[in-house]
Image: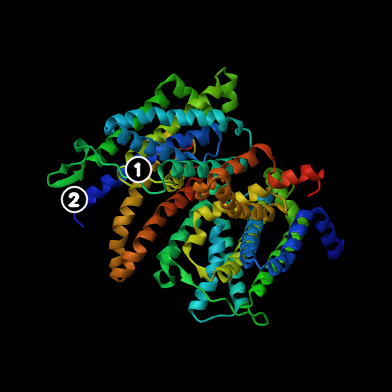
């Protein structure tokens, strides 16, 4: 294990962390402000990935494809809130689980009908497909670096939006006490629709960025949904700052675990057994991390209601 | 009240449940005459999933504890059969005792650790434990790892499971016994306290009762019922893999309960019947209406679930109550 490899893996961890943050940021606000259990957030990731992949194929330009796909993800969140979600706010959490589970099935099947069950693969434009040296003689894929930068830029954007704007103050007030916020004359309905649409938009951007790195396929959002739920629990429900810290933590632990655990296991068991057990035990790490954090801080690291 | 009186009264209050149980008891006669052995297979799957859902419903519906990891108990129950057979132990009764014991102990440990949290944090920590168990079994190469292990039908002294209908009636008996057990539990002092905790935990505390032991006991019982369902599932499928404890399976159990009706005795079984029947019937239906899209039946299934939420408050049992004027 060389320093170069370790550094490369840390970058990979950061890349998966910022991607998770983009998904978790919207979800933590939806859960925190609206107290709404939204399981179909993973579908928004899928919608973003498919919109970008198909528009890239249509226009022949990757950047144009992304640019056109962003309004689509915003619109899908806006419409979904308007058509269905707003009727479910006052309902039991379990009703929300069932309804949004139905949405997952619906969206996955819709994509399967529209684009076929096979995964889509999109080629990266030349400008993004090379390698750059992050250290002398440590080449790193250009696109992953771009993902990290875009993710960090979005994180700063979300931070400014939430912490330093009027809308952000309303959002934070809503997360803390919704009834009080509404009593102060804030249009909480419109605020909810806005948060939903923006959340869907960022989830969509996450989908666009992981699309070229992994397969774009129906059902791609659900594993990400579970991981981003872990992220918002660790961060504290409703806290964007917590979501960022937790996302990077989860991304790092997951990536480093996958690399380091097989190496550690190999030192005291056979190569084959270590290679078999390593990845599975690495997948456990994230959940062990979450349980440990919940033992010491039962409402997450940065709970806004605490 | 005598036990028999409670039983009769319970049967009267939960007619849907007992109608379904009677239906399952008589169903093989129909499939025998009509020569449809496949449907027996489906009925067994419905009964097993219904039993697991009933077990989960004790904590989810009656206790208000949303456990998102109960498929782990089903999986551990199933692996109890697989692992015993790996070591040459084929007695089915011992499998069942082991499944009950293992899931009881595991339920105690997970319940004790998880029940310090509540709300969404509880949902996620139960998921976390289930995921740990899932990945643990994926990593156990000795027991098949990711691919799982095949299982022979267990040998039950007295009952030879190679006769197909014997397994059917063994499952039926387990389901009926669990139903009756749950009916007694829900009506007992313990069950009443459990439901009171769901309603308002601080009031229960103010009355001088510590909620935690009640919640943990409920959690353990529900884990054991799921373990029993898992052991039977392994015998039915003759195969067990980590897939049985994947988080989507836990989700499926929750969906079945919510669809049927939370906190009702009949709901989980009715939910399992409707859920699995739709899974079978919708593709057939699509085949007739839109043959090109027969595989895409979920495009209908998803909106059906949403429609149940929007228009049938209280799930299918809520619908049943409205149709029959309050009877369940």
B212, above or below A213, in the image: below
Residue tagged by mark 2? A4
Q: In screen coordinates, is A94 left or right of A71? A: right
Q: Nearer the viewer, residue B42 or A285?
A: B42
Subunit ID for the residue under disc 2: A
Q: Residue B41 in the image: x percent, y percent?
A: 61, 65
The location of residue A89, given as percent across then percent down, is 60, 33
Nearer the observer, B33 or A116: B33
The percent position of residue B255, horizontal first and vertical second, equals 60, 49
Residue at coordinates 29% horizontally, 38% vertically from top-left? A147
The image shows residue B218, relative to residue A185, as above or below, that is below
- Give the secondary structure at mark 1: helix
- Residue A215: percent from the left, percent from the top? 34, 47
Asked whether the viewer can see residue A306, the reply is: no
State the image quarter where residue A181 is shown.
Answer: top right
Q: In the rendered structure, which disc, 2 or 1, sits on the residue that comes first in sequence?
A: 2
Q: Nearer the viewer, residue A259 or A292?
A: A259
Q: Quadrant of residue B145?
A: bottom left
């Amino acid at each position: 294990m060389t320093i170069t490899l370790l550094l490369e893996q840390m970058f990979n961890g950061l890349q998966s962390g910022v991607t998770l943050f983009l998904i978790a940021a919207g979800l933590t606000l939806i859960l925190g402000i609206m107290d709404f259990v939204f399981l179909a957030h993973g579908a928004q990731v899928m919608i973003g990935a498919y919109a970008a992949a198909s528009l890239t194929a249509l226009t022949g330009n990757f950047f144009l494809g992304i640019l056109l796909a962003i309004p689509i993800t915003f619109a899908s969140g806006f419409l979904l809130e308007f058509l269905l979600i707003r009727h479910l706010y006052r309902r039991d959490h379990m009703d929300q689980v069932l309804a949004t589970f139905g949405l997952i099935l619906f969206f996955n099947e819709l994509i399967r009908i529209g684009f076929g069950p096979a995964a889509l693969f999109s080629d990266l434009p030349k400008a993004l497909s090379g390698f750059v040296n992050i250290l002398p003689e440590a080449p790193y894929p250009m696109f992953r670096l771009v993902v990290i930068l875009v993710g960090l830029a979005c994180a700063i954007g979300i931070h400014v939006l939430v912490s330093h704007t009027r809308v952000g103050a309303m959002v934070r007030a809503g997360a803390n006490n919704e009834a009080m916020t509404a009593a102060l004359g804030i249009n909480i309905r419109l605020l909810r629709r806005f948060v939903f649409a923006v959340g869907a938009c960022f989830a969509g951007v996450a989908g666009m960025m992981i699309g070229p790195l992994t397969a774009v396929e129906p059902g791609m959002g659900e594993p990400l949904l579970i991981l981003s739920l872990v992220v918002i629990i660790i961060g504290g429900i409703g806290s964007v700052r917590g979501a960022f810290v937790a996302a990077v933590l989860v991304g790092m632990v997951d990536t480093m675990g996958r690399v380091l655990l097989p190496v550690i296991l190999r030192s005291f068991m056979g190569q084959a057994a270590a290679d078999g057990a390593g990845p599975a035990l690495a997948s456990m790490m994230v959940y062990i991390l979450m349980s440990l954090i919940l033992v010491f801080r039962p409402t997450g690291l940065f709970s806004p209601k605490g | 009240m005598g036990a028999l009186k409670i039983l009769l009264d319970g049967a009267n209050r939960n007619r849907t449940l007992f109608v379904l149980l009677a239906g399952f008891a008589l169903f093989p006669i129909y499939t025998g005459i009509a020569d449809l052995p496949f449907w027996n297979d489906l009925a067994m799957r419905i009964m097993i999933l219904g039993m697991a859902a009933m077990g989960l419903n004790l904590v989810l519906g009656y206790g208000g504890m949303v456990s998102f990891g109960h498929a782990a108990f089903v999986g551990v129950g199933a692996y109890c059969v697989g692992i015993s057979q790996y070591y040459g132990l084929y007695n089915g009764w011992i499998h069942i005792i082991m499944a009950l014991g293992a899931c009881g102990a595991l339920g105690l440990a997970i319940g004790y650790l998880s029940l310090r949290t509540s709300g969404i944090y509880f949902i996620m920590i139960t998921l976390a434990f289930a995921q740990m168990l899932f990945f643990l079994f994926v990593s156990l190469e000795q027991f098949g790892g990711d691919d799982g292990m095949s299982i022979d039908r267990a040998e039950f002294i007295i009952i030879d499971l190679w006769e197909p209908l014997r397994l059917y009636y063994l499952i039926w008996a387990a389901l009926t016994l669990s139903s009756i057990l749950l009916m007694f539990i829900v009506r007992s002092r313990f069950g009443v306290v459990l439901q009171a905790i769901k309603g308002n935990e601080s009031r229960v505390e103010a009355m001088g009762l510590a909620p935690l032991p009640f919640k943990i006991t409920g959690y353990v019982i529900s884990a054991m019922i799921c373990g029993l369902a898992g052991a039977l599932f392994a015998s039915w499928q003759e195969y067990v893999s980590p897939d049985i404890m994947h988080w989507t399976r836990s989700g499926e159990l929750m969906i079945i309960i919510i669809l049927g009706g939370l906190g009702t005795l009949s709901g989980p079984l009715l939910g399992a019947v409707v859920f699995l029947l739709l899974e079978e019937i919708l593709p057939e239906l699509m085949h007739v209406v839109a043959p090109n899209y027969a595989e895409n039946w979920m495009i209908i299934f998803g909106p059906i679930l949403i429609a149940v939420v929007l228009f049938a408050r209280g799930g299918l049992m809520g619908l049943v109550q409205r149709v029959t004027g309050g009877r369940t």
